[in-house]
Amino acid sequence: MKDHLHTSEDQLNLPEEFSRRSFLKLAGFTFAGGVLAGCQQSNLEKAIPHLIKPEELVPGVPLWYASTCAGCSAGCGVLVKTRDGRPIKLEGNPEHPISRGGLCAVGQASLLGLYDSQRLGAPLAHGKESTWEQVDAAIKAELEGIRKRNGAVRFLTGTITSPTTNELVRRFLSTFKDARHVVYDPVSSSALLDAHERTHGVRALPQFRLEKATTIVSLNADFLGTWLSPVEFTKAYRQGRSLQGTPPVFSYHTQFESRLSITGSNADERVSVSPVELAHVASRLLSLLTERAGRRLPVAVPLLDERLERCTTECVERLWRTKGKSLVVCGVNDVAIQVVVNAINEVLGNYGSTIDLNRSSYQAQGNDTDLAKLLDEIRSGNVSALFVDGVNPFYDLPGAQELAAACETIPLPVSFGERNDETAEHMHYVLPQPHELERWNDSEAIAGIVSLTQPTIQPLRPARPLMETISIWMGTKESAYNLIRAEWERSIFKRQTREQSFTQFWNKTLHDGFAIVEPKRQAVSSFNPAAVAESLRQLSTQSLQQKLFVELHASSTILDGRHAHNAWLQELPDPVTKIVWDNVASLSRKRAESLNLHEGDVVRLNREGGRVIELPIHIQQGHQDDVISVSLGYGRKGTDRFHHVNPKWLQAKPTVEKGGTVGTNAAPLLEWKGKTLSYFVSGIEVERTGTNRQIAVTQEYDFLTNPNLLGESSGEKRNIIQQASLATFVANPSAGSFPKPPLDSLWPEEHTYPGHRWGMVIDLTACTGCSACVISCQVENNIPVVGKDEVARNRELQWLRIDRYYEEEGETLRVAHQPMLCQHCGNAPCETVCPVLATVHNSEGLNQQVYNRCVGTRYCANNCPYKVRHFNWFQYPRGDEIARMVLNPDVTVRDRGVMEKCTFCVQRIQLAKIEAKNEGRALRDGDVKSACQQSCPADAIIFGDVNDPNSEVSRKMKDPRTYRVLEELGVRPSIGYMTLVRNSDGIAVAEGGMKNG
Amino acid sequence: MAEILSTLRPPLVLGNKSYADITDDVCSALERKSSTGWWTSFIIAVGVLILGAISVGYQLVTGVGVWGLNNTVGWAFDITNFVFWIGIGHAGTLISAILFLFRQRWRTSINRSAEAMTLFAVICAGIFPIIHTGRPWFAYWFIPYPNFRGPLWVNFRSPLVWDMFAIGCYLTISALFWYVGLLPDLATIRDRAKTMWRKKIFGFFSFGWDGSNRTWQRYEKLYLLLAGLATPLVVSVHTIVSWDFATSIIPGWHTTIFPPYFVAGAVFSGFAMVLMLMLIVRKVMNLEDYITLHHIENMTKVIIATSGMVGLAYITELFVAYYSGNPYERFAFINRALGPYGWAYWLMVTCNVVVPQFFWWKKIRRHVGMVFILSIFINVGMWFERFVIIMTSLTRDFLPGSWSGFTPTILDITTLLGSFGLFFTLFLLFARFLPMIAIGEVKGVAGVKRATPPGAVEKRKEVAHEPAPVG
């Protein structure tokens, strides 16, 4: 976004120069407000064109609104692009202090949820459609009764970051004698908060400042993938790992983990540990660090085995060296480990520097203890009214069936949600909630950072937000807009001093999407060492003996299952396994061999108590031998809607069986360990079923080395990813470079680029492989979903893929992620072979695909050395009428039989040119941002005009790290890749590799 | 009948045929009611053709996705079949044109069928470049025709455009050559016709042939000219087809050896196919006197020679891949032999290099059954040669992250079968309605006979002069 707003927290003044875009954003707010006021209740029956066109509405010109992402509870800022009243794209808000312009794949894909025609269209009463009046009357009557007999009212929600909603729920519950608001997160971080309660006297989630950390040690925390706030963390992580400056400030990241996570794949050192070892590593780190600090632990900590002892000692060395500038994070939902980790950070003096407990985060507020208590109450039949919002307890908790049976006794179970899900179907009343893009909402995800959500479309379904419902039940009947305004005027406005009038503050916040206010102070007490001894004792009792664990973790794409109805995310390859449309039981090759299992064999994971799930197995590199990892979030009810998401033909296999589900729900395996939910489950029996299920992956061969066809280690390594260690990079900025091939040509230069020449640079050091760009591209460019079977046939259509390569060297596993898209070659092999000139080079260096002219010989795709061209094998179904509203009108919807590929977002280039022309100026660097670049949380992609010597891209092109993939072919790609630099000493990748022939 | 006696050459036509015998032998087959054998074969062929037609129809309606292709493997059975059929066609032109110019008079017994085979094979081949496209209804855009869209022109740098010209030329010349050769025989049938319609139809198609000296003279001149025109095509068509691969940048395709290698392979497979067909035809149509063991032996000798060339090409490819020092190229060939499609490679090597070596034995060369079986092997091998070239290079090219495999679908297989159905349907119709043997030409060589039984002491000093060329 070209905007003049400042990103820094202290410089929040309205820009001096009020840009057109800023004006549009403000104007857009006014428009949306008008729509809201006018159309709240009415049913629109006829669409008539504007008799008098509102000034800001120009057909074909997008309007942008600043809003807040609701893909998870991290609260990233988004800009919503609307065209003709339809939101068609979500992009990161560059000024938003949490996400700073990044937006993850989940956030971007959440747009599709708006156009889901299966969202509830009316409230349900006892499973039947009803009206709001009837439902309200019935519930109010019931509530009156409960109030009179002092029945227990329980509000069960996920993390709610909205201050208004929280306040309303509080007020609503305060009208009852026995009422409680219970919060839980389906993938819980409760222990992290509980640990702080024990060590710092405040149950809060601190804000982790990865950008300030020179040494990062993560114990199974997938902070670049799904943990708490991945976009924020990715931004910060990258900020702390910059190759600018001499010497560069580049953090050292050690990851102790049991499965290969996306975070582990980026770590400088990755230590694969079993869950038990993990606990002992934490203790050992603490004990070594305490020794360093000249103190003694009250509890003796056992030594680890040789390998781990070496790793932890090294780790401690680094941590101690960078004391106060280090950070240890832990993703295990176990209070004891978290307390030990807190103690480690305390010894290192990280509180107050890399860990901010004063400005705490509200991104995860779940409290497993509360939840456990509520479940007990439900089981004992003591709950009179249960309101469920934003979570799906009958799906994502263990023992869901038993729980559902217990709920039968509750007189008033009510669910708020978008669809009649696993929980809703057991509820007497289901009250549909609007999508975040069609409602007003607010959020305070991190203390002091408040953002607003504004409606960007007239509601597609007659839903009513929770806050309005509560307001009606409390007899006030206010609109969400008024409720939020009132709450903000009451509490939030007072927490800032910059703006004098509330209206000004409100308008500015709405325009910007966020505001910075004073965080609410919490009473943080000093570190309490007493908790540590107990935790250490608890951990030391765990036997180091080997046993098999199942690790349950959030899916990288559909998270805890809340996005299971999102076809884009279902088809987004997992950044590590590259699997789509399924969850699997991942295990190491060694374990698979010992169990005599092969890829795709379906196994039964038996847990005592009859809890069984069946899953196909997947052999995964870097997996700890004692762990089988399974992704949560799959097996959601109603996902058989994707039965025919793939094209129909003779040998097509449905993406999901009728009546079946996409993947299998692994939640039944979850285990209560005391009062916390444990994601490491032991006592699992693995049983072969003898059947086999096809796993659809987008990458079939995972290595940079050729297969050993001529015997052991005959495989040569291919020169595709340049890698260097930080030390060699500092000594020589072009370290790790492949030999430059001689590229002299007898032919005269065929193409001249008199004006612009578009180019891109992708920094492999920055790229984490998170796949936000893949979805961004898919949304921007109307790329259809093709279904599991088509992906299994290697016919996925995403224009941008991320190749993920493994390199194994003894114990160490190195992972490299390489975004691969059309390279817009200056000497493109696809162009010469097309018989009908359907793919041609333009004067700005774009390799253009002319869909109308394409006959579909696929010769171009065959001759593409990067294999980035995608063919429309069929006429792909694009969903129903509502789903098709998401299509970007600026991009052609391709028919069957034509080739397609990355266009460098030519529509964005054109738009920027038109805007520049209208403003009578030349195109500036940064005016055009490709979709993949815009939302990249790691800022790994730079796009721009290579002919402009001052543009960022042309500067990066000249960087000694920049190289072209397969340069020796002489195709002269327009995309430069920058050497992957790791902060590990041992990389001798500069040597070896192959010589160019 | 002018007798030509030779001590050196075996007779080209056995059975001491008179001109009338020859006419009778060839034409009577067309004038009888069809045999049950013919009907059975025809029904099977048409059945398979219909199966293929349904497959193609379904594919046109549904999309190319009904084949097993994918993002990495854009071509598989489709282009394999195309190159295979184009290759088959080569023997016909070689026999009719080059052997004609080289005065190989033994060709007369087989040239008609071989030419027909060429024509039908080219028809089969021509279907694939059209149906393999995503939008076959726009396949005419390959042709540079004047239009009002710009005008939009074709890309003359694309080997597919060259292909279009090459195949177009080939089809035209082959059809013309075949048809011109048919003219005197069509007239013969016309003259023998008993019914009015038969007379009229053959009368029309024989272009009023009157058998006069002048007609013959002009006919022979034209035939010679067409042979001259067709000769470069033998080399050019498959050369150009090979450029589809050779001009690309994919390792394993990007090789300069492809043109000669493809031409040799084409002749090799073409002769195997001619052999297969001739062995059936001579048996079914009672033409053993015309298509003799001598003919069969000659053809097997061509096969040994071309098999050697193909084998040499295989070895050269491996050597050059090693010697080039190009890691991608080297891997492409290691992978070709030892990778996931290694079985296809070794099947190809066995069929194309090992199997033909049996033809060094005269006994096998003259054993009809053995020759038949071995030619089937060769045809299988040559289909796999194209499959291996396309598959191994496409599935594993530059970036390992994009590597893939290929599994044919049912429709891949039915379409391949369908092309055989089409080929045999056309061939059977040809066998039923047109003379399988060039009557006029065979008559020219019927007089070549052994002077004395072989081995007898030869007293005669008169050296048999060369039979006068037809032209």
Image (spheres, rainbow, N blue to C red):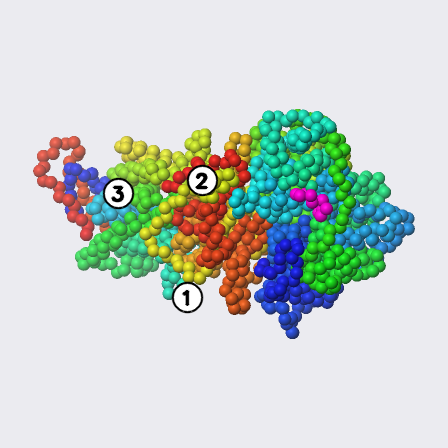
Q: Main secondary structure of the magenta part?
A: strand
Residue A615 in the image: x percent, y percent?
63, 37
Residue A58 in the image: x percent, y percent?
60, 68
Is A359 colored magenta in this rendering? yes
For disc 3, the marked residue is: B290
Q: Which residues are magenta?
A: A352-361
Rendered view: A928 above or below A293:
below
The residue sitting at 43% across, 45% down in the picture is A966
Q: How many angstroms separate mark 2 from mark 1 (CA)?
A: 44 Å
User: Residue flagged by tag 2: what amino acid is it?
Assistant: Arg
Left or right: A363 in relation to B355: right
Numbered badge on residue B150: 1
Residue A338 in the image: x percent, y percent?
70, 37
The residue sitting at 20% across, 55% down in the picture is B221
Q: Nearer the viewer, mark 3 or mark 1?
A: 1
For disc 2, the marked residue is: A718
Question: On the image, which quarter does residue B80 sit in?
Answer: top left
- Which SS class for mark 2? loop
Q: Nearer the viewer, mark 2 or mark 1?
A: 2
The answer for which chain carries disc 2 is A
